[in-house]
Image (cartoon, helix red, strand yellow):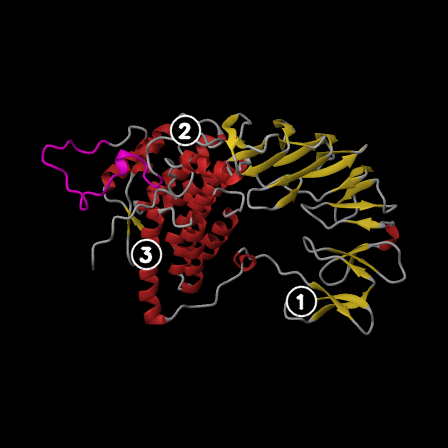
Amino acid sequence: MPAPPATSTAPDGASDTTDEDAPPPADDTPAGQPGAAAEAAPEEQPAAEDEQPEVRPADPEQALAAFRWRLHPETLREEAPDPAALREVRDGLTTKLGSALDNRSRARLLSLRSVASRILGDLDDALADARLALTYADATGELRRTALARARLAEVLRWRGEYAEADRLFAEANSPELPDRLRAALHEHAGRCCYDQGRLTEACLHFERAMDLRQGEDAELSARTAVALDAVAERAAAGGFGPKPRSREAVLSRERYPVPTFDEELQLWGYADADGNLVVEHRYAEVQPFGEGMAWVRRPEASRWALIDTTGVALIEANNGYRAVGSFSEGLAWVSMDGKGRWMAVDPTNIVKIPPGFEDVRPFRGGLAAVRQNGGWGAVDRTGQVVVPTRYHSLSTTLADGRQVDGFTEEGLAGVELAGRRGVVDRTGRVLVAPVYPVLVVHPVAFLVRDESGRWGARDRRGQPLIDPVHPSRAAVVAEIDQLLADTSPVL
């Protein structure tokens, strides 16, 4: 068997060893190279006789980031060139864990220790650490931290052959609100998981997506992808490319709800399953799509809406008097008795959870919903407590990929507008960026802002100045942010 190439798998996104709320300062380290400790492997650049032995960083987190993994050309698994050094790093992480008291630190250190244990082959220890790390990460409510914990747990499960859960975790982790580098890494690792299962076409789609996200700017990723595609080609030549690719919904094992279907002859709506079979008869004048296994429907003879389950059984009867309704989201639906305002939130048993009193509303997202009251927009939590005062002219968020989100992002951020000026609040209602900019865009690691003169700059996740507004275009600011992230390298 040929010797495995010394291919680094470290440079996969923003650093997990620095403050994760803002890009670290730029240094002279090129993208994809975590520092002097990550120079060429010994077989590629033999040390001179008088050269001093390589000195790894004293901090175990930095030392782990500096490791050069070998990617095995057949299994596509990382191999440690120096297992003894990796055990020493794992011991160092254990020591740091002894003094880590907050959820952020414990999530990070446990998931990094799971990486070390996995590559050393101690999969039971790796699994225990990775599951506990995800618990701590979930408690922080931070999108990127949770994504990293999910990905590291997924890799352990992949090595254990527990592919269904691994696939699901990779899919759950990969949010479009994450930095492109991290998203590329998630696709790459998901592709390796598909490779293990013989889903070679699906694996290639993941590898292609990873390359597209980096646009040819990541030499290390290109080298790893070349190794992976060679492995795919060899396996495909022997046994074909395997099953057709799955949808994201299929990977996540989400239930496929019936979809509305219209009978032209009866001029009535019903619902059909994924195969086109009618599962709820055509008997409604109006219907809404299913959300969380429930859908609002209105019969021709009724002016009010009823709620049904996927079999057509009524959960809330039309005689409750709802003239306007919204789909269920996070267990609650907004309903209105007059169809014009005074919106209130009910649960599937028709218990009022938030009393009427809102002129307009949006679905719950991440435990919060945008609402309008007395002409101003704000947000409430699931108990109806006002979290963001209803003082803004709008509560909508523009993302860097062009999407517009009503209310809060997955990360718990919302764009606010006041007198034509844009700012940002977080899920606690804290103002991160005062509404003073004509344009503001939420980037995965920063806030892109445009001033009155049309120049672009950026603020970090704390709302502090990061890049002065001197650039003529948004793309130029994004390019500078990429430079700030060039020295970072979390390990998956």
**Mark 3 crowdedness (10 Å alpha carbons): few <14, some 14-19, many ≥20:** some
For residue 202, say whether it is visible. Answer: yes
Magenta stretch encompasses residue 449:
no
> What residue does disc 3 label?
226
Q: Which of marks 2 and 1 is nearer the N terminus?
A: 2
Q: Mark 2 and mark 3: span between their CA atoms?
A: 31 Å
Q: Looking at the magenta stretch, what is its main secondary structure?
A: loop
Residue 408: image location, x then y, percent: 64, 39
**Mark 1 crowdedness (10 Å alpha carbons): few <14, some 14-19, many ≥20:** some
* Foreground residue among 100 and 282: 282
Magenta segment:
31-55
For residue 352, say whether it is visible. Answer: no
> What residue does disc 2 label?
25
Q: Mark 1 and mark 3: span between their CA atoms?
A: 41 Å
Q: Is 78 on the left or on the right of 305, as rendered?
A: left
> What residue does disc 1 label?
273
Q: Are marks 2 and 3 in contact (CB under 8 Å)?
A: no
Q: Is 441 on the left or on the right of 28, as rendered?
A: right
Q: Which quadrant would residue 308 be assigned to in this image?
A: bottom right
| Residue type beneath disc 1 | Asp
Magenta stretch encompasses residue 54:
yes
Q: Earlier in the sequence, mark 2 or mark 3?
A: 2
Disc number lying in front (1 or 3)? 3
